[in-house]
Amino acid sequence: MSAAPPFDWEAVLDRLSELYGTGDWRTPYLRDHAENPFQVMIGTILSQRTRDENTDRASARLFARYPDAPSLAAARLSTIEPLIHDTGFYHTKARLIRDASRQLLGRFDGTVPRTFEELTTLPGVGPKTANCVLVFGYGIPAIPVDTHVHRIANRLGVVRTKSPEETEQRLREVVPREYWIPLNPLLVQHGQNLCRPIGPKCGECPIADLCATGIALRSGREPPRRADRPRRPDGRRSPRPNRRRPRRSGAPARTV
């Protein structure tokens, strides 16, 4: 049996970049999208378990007053918390971002590390945050995986995973390194607009013909994720397609 052809990541990135007008994804990321590594790190910590718009508002307020590690490390929690209140869990996040700032000063001379291993030793910095710093702060190839990337990767059928952490590990294995940097920003934008958690707009999607979920839904077959099965008018998931169970050995065939 011949092996399945490799997934066409180049077509995915081409079509999504054209749809969202982000320019040529082959352009070195930092040429047009340079960001402050410290603010990428702190902003990504704030983004955990909250909506993007809440993160944007809170980050703008925080960085207007504490734009760098020295200023945030010296701040009082009582002044940080009101600035980031919109992100939820603000007591915990205020402590984490101040502690991370203090460790940057004490252990790294105030400079955000450039390696995944060092980044993940800082308070509040997990795999997603570390990878965001590498990509958006330093232009180093990595694959940050949030709920959007996790969901879309499973809908595309390129992974079968249960958590963002598992998805990140698997994507590193199946996605050629040349596609790592543009993958997150384009999939996140797609997840916010068309490939939504509920009610994805498959009819408007430019990559539906490459997507295992889009192909399955058009042909009346079951998509990779149970959550993507069409809903009935009563809101319940449609049943699985009717499949005849194999007859047990020695059992008589059913007659109609």
Image (cartoon, grey):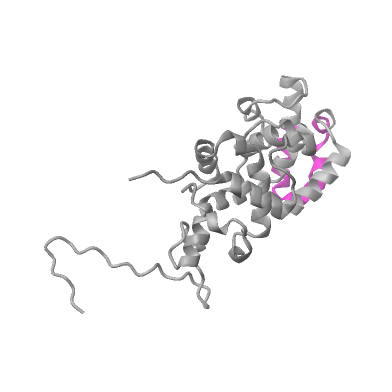
Residue sitting at x 66%, y 51% = 16
Q: Quadrant of residue 60?
A: top right
- Above or below, 91 against 244 in this view is above
Residue 130 image position (x, y, % from top left): 65, 34
Residue sitting at x 68%, y 35% = 135
Residue 193 image position (x, y, % from top left): 68, 58
Query: Bounds of the magenta span?
Result: 72-99
The quadrant of the picture occupied by the N terminus is top left
Q: Nearer the viewer, residue 238 or 25?
A: 25
- Above or below, 247 against 140 in this view is below
Q: Is residue 149 left or right of residue 30?
A: left
Tag count: 0
Check the image and name the residue furthest to the left.
Answer: 250
Residue 226 image position (x, y, % from top left): 46, 60
Q: Nearer the viewer, residue 35 or 78?
A: 35
Q: Is residue 170 left or right of residue 142?
A: left
Q: Nearer the viewer, residue 141 or 93?
A: 141
Q: Is residue 212 left or right of residue 255?
A: right
Give the prevailing secondary structure in the magenta stretch. Answer: helix
Check the image and name the residue furthest to the bottom.
Answer: 256
- Is residue 76 shown in magenta? yes
- Is residue 65 shown in magenta? no
Note whether residue 118 is visible.
yes
Note whether residue 51 is visible.
no
Residue sitting at x 70%, y 55% = 19
Check the image and name the residue furthest to the front.
Answer: 2
Residue sitting at x 76%, y 53% = 53
Residue 256 image position (x, y, % from top left): 21, 79
